Amino acid sequence: MAEAVTVDLKYLNSLLVERMKVRRRPVAVTYCSDGPPPGYEPASVVACAIVREAEAGRRVYVDAQHHDCWVGQYHLGWLPDAGRLITDGQYLTMAQGFFTEEGARRNKAQSSVLPAGSIAALAAAPLDDVPAGVAVDVLICITDPMHVMQIAGAASVREGTFPIGEIGPSACASIFATPRLTRNSVFATGDGGGRMHNRVAAGEMFVAVPSEHFQYIIELIENFRIDPDEMRRLIMPSHAAERREAP
C-alpha cells in the first residue's frame, strides 16, 4: 500500500460535496495516542455516534471516561477485561430474538478490535473544519451505494487495492477498528444500533477511508470521465459490429 500523502482537506471536502455531490457532511476521524486534540469536546454518546455529532458541526471525542456504549469501548481497545456479555456477544441474544448463541459468539470473534490501549481517544470533526495541526487518520461518509462504490473503490482504480466490505459487525468495529488495522478502505452497512444512532436511511451506508487513500479520491474525481459509447464498442461484440456496419 502507498504511504499517506498530505492533502488539502478543504479541497478534498469540496470535491466530495461540490463535484461528487455527497449529501451528508464528510467527517474526519483522528486516532489520538495522547488524548484528544485541543478544541474537541467530550461526548457521552455511543462511539459510532461521533460521526453524526461531527456531521452536525461539532468537534468531539470519546475515550475510556466519556462514552455511552460498552461495545464501542471493547472494539476501541478500552475494555481489556470485558466479560462474555460483550466478548461472546451475549448481549445480542439477551436483547434480541433472532441471534443464536453461536451466531452471536462468532459475530464478535470475527469483528475487529483495536489492541488494548493503542489509542487514548477517538476524535471526530467536519472534514472542512479540522483545526490546524490535527492529523486526520480516516475519512467517513454516510452516503448512497453508488457514491460508496466510488469513494471506497478509489484505491482500486488507482493502485488496484480492493476495499473491504463488512455486513454483520458493529458499526464501531467496521468504521473505526477495521480501517486502522488493515489500512484499507471499508464499506459497511453497520449494525442496527449504529444505523439508528447515525440516522442512516434505508438507501445509505458507511464508507471509511484511511489517510493513505485520500489522494486516490482526489485523483478519481479530478480524472472522472466515462465514454459509454466507447466502452460498449470495446467490450460488446454486438455494439462493435454495429459500429463497423455504420456508413
Image: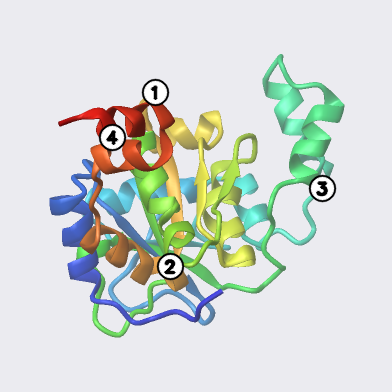
Residue behind mark 1: 202
Q: Nearer the viewer, mark 4 or mark 2?
A: 4
In this rendering, the answer to whether 76 lies above or below 135 is above
Q: Extreme right residue here?
A: 102
Which residue: 24% across, 65% down? 12
Query: In this orientation, which residue lies closer to the viewer: 159 or 49?
Result: 159
Q: Calculate the distance from the C-alpha at mark 3 to the C-alpha at mark 4.
A: 69 Å
Q: Nearer the viewer, mark 3 or mark 4?
A: 4
Q: Residues within 10 Å of mark 2 (few under 14, many from 20)?
A: many
| Disc 4 secondary structure class | helix
- Residue 241 location (% of width, % of height): 34, 30
- Residue 237 location (% of width, % of height): 42, 31
Q: Nearer the viewer, mark 2 or mark 3?
A: 2
Which quadrant: the C terminus?
top left
User: Which mark is first along the chain, 4 or 3?
Assistant: 3
User: Which mark is first along the chain, 2 or 4?
Assistant: 2
Query: In this orientation, which residue lies closer to the viewer: 245 or 11?
Result: 245
Q: Which mark is residue 87?
A: none
Q: Nearer the viewer, mark 1 or mark 3?
A: 1
| Disc 1 secondary structure class | loop
Residue behind mark 2: 213
